[in-house]
Amino acid sequence: MMLPSVLLHDHLDGGLRPETCLDLANQHGYNDLPTNDAEELHAWFDQSASGSLEGYLESFDHTIGVMQQASAIERVAYEAGVDVASHGVVYAEFRFCPGLFTNRGLTLNEVIEAAASGFSKAGAETGLVWGIIVDAMRQLEDSMEMARVAISCRGLGVVGFDIAGPEQGFPPANHLAACRLVRESGLRLTLHAGEAGGKHGVAYMAQAMDMCGAERLGHGIEIINDCLVEDGNITKLGAVARRVRDRQIPLEVCPTSNMATGSLRPEEHPLGALHRAGFNVTLSTDNRLMSQTTMPAEFEFATTHHGITVDDLAIITRRSLAAAFCDHDVKQQLWHDRIRPAYTDAGATPGVLH
Ligand SMILES: [Zn+2]
């Protein structure tokens, strides 16, 4: 049985179908793919993406390389919408940095327009409700420009802003001005923090939340480093962990992706411990191509390795929807029409959406 889900953290350039990657490369004369066989390419993405966040990010050169035309971006966005909807996702926020897709002359606006057009088509066909999160890359210095274009493209479905990319050495506070501009405009803010910040992970989360004003944290799993864990359970919280938990800051946890970049074993992932300790854990896919994952696969991971029950999945989905950057009436409708009935049928007590 496939349960409905809410997907808060999914990178557009990390979710291509391998065949589409090949098609687009042929169509537009991109000759740098490691192989011309879809299956081999799928395996290559999976394998090149394991071990470190930096290796993982390298594989994006190819997906970005084949997404430099409006028609290519529109196709990838359309297929992303159709694919996640086919896996039970009823609401998705897709993210990308428009500045990465301008190598062949597209403007930032045209990039967002093309993506929005693809998502709209997928939404019309499948009923998927979607939003766009505009990313700025944390290692670059154009976050103000990305923030401005995000704000100006609200009419196209942009609902939020984020900082993504290699974490170590690039603290969120480097982009304080962009974050402030976004918040002042009323656009919503989530920031990648505590994914792979190493010894800075906890400090970066504090910066993202306290200085930059992030409403959600991308991953945030390194908050476990500010907790005392005994026998697999959190027994004591540090100051930052306490703020994250007490303010119920939603953590966009992407288990399969975290295991690849952090070389974790399934049971070493902190999601179970964080969930049991009352953190606001949500589940997402991050990069469906590089991590070869889907929302049902992430649910399966949580139930198999971390004792998450159908009741827990109902809670996680309710929290995800509450944390979404769409309008409240849209949330109420999705909850009452599509999510609550399915979880009730599955024997869960989904509770009340606030
Ligand atoms: Zn991410």
Image: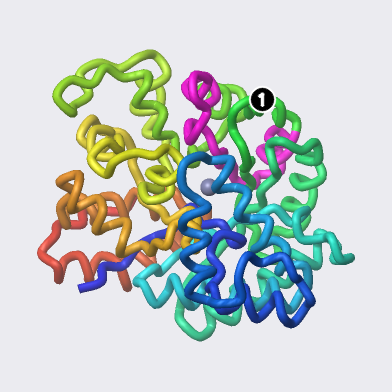
Q: Residues within 10 Å of mark 1 (few under 14, many from 20)?
A: some
Residue 184 shown in magenta: yes
Residue in the image at 59% along x and 45% along y: 188
Residue 296 relative to residue 171: left or right:
left
Color theme of the render: rainbow
- The part of the chain drawn in magenta is 178-205
Residue 246, image x and y in percent?
34, 26
**Which of the image's four quarters has the N terminus?**
bottom left
Residue 179, image x and y in percent?
68, 35
Residue in the image at 70% along x and 44% along y: 136
Q: Is mark 1 within 8 Å of ligand 1?
A: no
Residue 9 relative to residue 108: left or right:
left
Residue 50, image x and y in percent?
46, 47
Is 264 or 84 nearer to us in this picture? Answer: 264
Tell me which corner region of the image, top left, top right, bottom left or bottom right, holds residue 271.
Answer: top left
Residue 177 relative to residue 80: left or right:
right
Residue wearing tag 1: 173
Residue 232, image x and y in percent?
18, 28
Residue in the image at 81% along x and 59% along y: 108
Residue in the image at 35% along x and 20% along y: 242
Q: Is residue 327 visible?
A: no
Decide: is 185 above or below 291.
Answer: above
Residue 268 relative to residue 174: left or right:
left
Decide: is 299 above or below 138.
Answer: below
Tell me which corner region of the image, top left, top right, bottom left or bottom right, holds residue 270.
Answer: top left
Is 127 or 265 nearer to us in this picture? Answer: 265
